[in-house]
Amino acid sequence: MWSKLFAAVLAALFIQGAQAQVVAPTGTLATVLPAATDPAFGGFISDGGAGGNINGMNLLTLSDPSVVNADGSVDFPSAHTGYAVVDSTNPSQITIIGNFKGSSPDFWHGTPDNSGTGGGVINVMAEDVDCNMNAACFAPAPHTAAIPIPGNSTGAINIWPVHPNEGNYVYNTMFEMNVFADADTLNSQGQPIPTVRTVPVLFNVTQGQSGYGSRAITSGYGEDGYAHFYAWEGDTTGLKVARVPWSSREDITTWDYWHGGNGGWVTGQPLTYNSDAGGNALNLTNQNTFFGCDVRYVDRFNTFIITFSGGPDFSQYISYSTTGDITGPYSDPAVLFNPVLNAGCAGKGGLQLTDFPQMHWEYYGTTADKTLVSWGSCDYYTDMAVVQWS
Ligand SMILES: *[C@@H]1O[C@H](CO)[C@@H](O)[C@H](O)[C@H]1NC(C)=O
Ligand SMILES: *[C@@H]1O[C@H](CO)[C@@H](O)[C@H](O)[C@H]1NC(C)=O
Ligand SMILES: *[C@@H]1O[C@H](CO)[C@@H](O)[C@H](O)[C@H]1NC(C)=O
């Protein structure tokens, strides 16, 4: 009897969950906060900074992070890749993991053993053959948020696109990290977070394979989150998505690929890069998902939200699943906000633009009426701001 009652309650909860009304997200850029600084290094700039909560910390994925010296000069870049943690009470204060002091050309490309100042997050392996066997040319360019591994409070997974020798992105790589301590402890060690590449070459984009996971990775919602995560690719046609079983994540033959409303999920048949638009979860044209794409289930809206930087103005666009399902259909993308160029950029050399707007959904939590956002301003600032939801 009790188990029957329990089952009934579970069923009721499930139906309630499935029926939760999708809320269309509307919001405005309400507050621009001081640019991010690091107590150990001072000023700080990075392309991107996708955020995810791991072990209670809001972890930023950094691409070309650089520290800005007290005299205003920039050692660009201090490292090619890295992580930082946003302070839990002051979003303008970040702690860079590792020692990024000084300009160390070795770390422009990373080194096979991750030795030396700054350190790379992921190292070169023999499988990195598209690098013409030249280990020193390895140059990952990450913009994806890490997601937690279910049942492991310190474990996280990430997938990064790889640009050997600063050329076009040719393949992506999967790795796992162990975020075992608080930010201050990690920082005092002067070392990057320990990582291991589990699938060095996940998809070869040069061979027409869609690099699933190189635009965004997303935890599943509810019970599904223990079984699957979702790996996204953005190409010239739009966004493609794969459903990855946690238990066999390293074996791409077990992944399911979304083939659109008629095809559904198909095991072992990835879509082709820059083609197969019929299987896209969201069609896009001339919009650059490379500059900061995020996909999250946001409880406030009872649905999955896609954000990305669209077009030459680098505005932050937003689209939501109208059904609550990760496969959509998704609403037509709308501009959520236009990043504001930091006033300190005036008179400085280099690029006078904002780029890589990114949502930090977990910072205030996914039920909150506000969300922390960030973007890069000229070559000198990582600006932090707050979007207020209506
Ligand atoms: C959690 O995951 C990380 C990354 O794969 C791994 O290094 C660590 O050993 C795992 N911890 C446990 C307790 O399984
Ligand atoms: C990627 O291409 C390399 C050769 O360039 C090959 O050795 C490797 O097996 C390929 N990997 C995948 C996942 O297709
Ligand atoms: C995307 O466009 C293709 C045609 O190029 C179409 O077949 C497909 O249904 C569209 N997908 C979505 C989600 O709108």
Image (cartoon, rainbow, N blue to C red):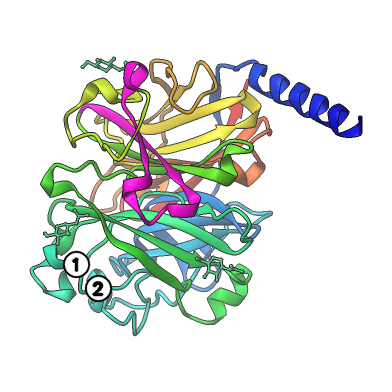
Q: Name the residue under label 1.
A: 128
Residue found farthest to the right: 1
Q: Which of 183 and 297 is in front in this view?
A: 297
The residues colored magenta run 237-263
Place residue 310 in its image quadrant: top left
Can you see residue 35?
no
Query: Would the CB of label 1 be found within 8 Å of ligand 2?
Result: no
Give the quadrant of ligand 3.
Answer: top left
Q: Mark 2 points at which residue?
A: 125
Judge from the rendering whether residue 390 lies leftward or rightward of residue 248; answer left or right.
right
| 69 in the magenta segment | no
Q: Do the residues labelled 1 and 2 touch (CB within 8 Å)?
A: yes
Q: Which of 247 and 280 is in front in this view?
A: 247
- Percent from the top left, x then y, of residue 121? 38, 69
Label 2: few (<14), some or many (≥20) within 10 Å? some
Q: Residue at x 61, y 76 (%)?
A: 185
Residue 363's disc is none
Question: In what element is the residue under mark 1?
Answer: loop
| 247 in the magenta segment | yes
Q: In this view, does 233 lie above or below 90?
A: above
Q: In which quarter of the image is the C terminus?
A: top right
- Percent from the top left, x then y, of residue 108? 24, 70
Q: Nearer the viewer, residue 215 or 59?
A: 215
Question: In what element is the residue under mark 2?
Answer: loop
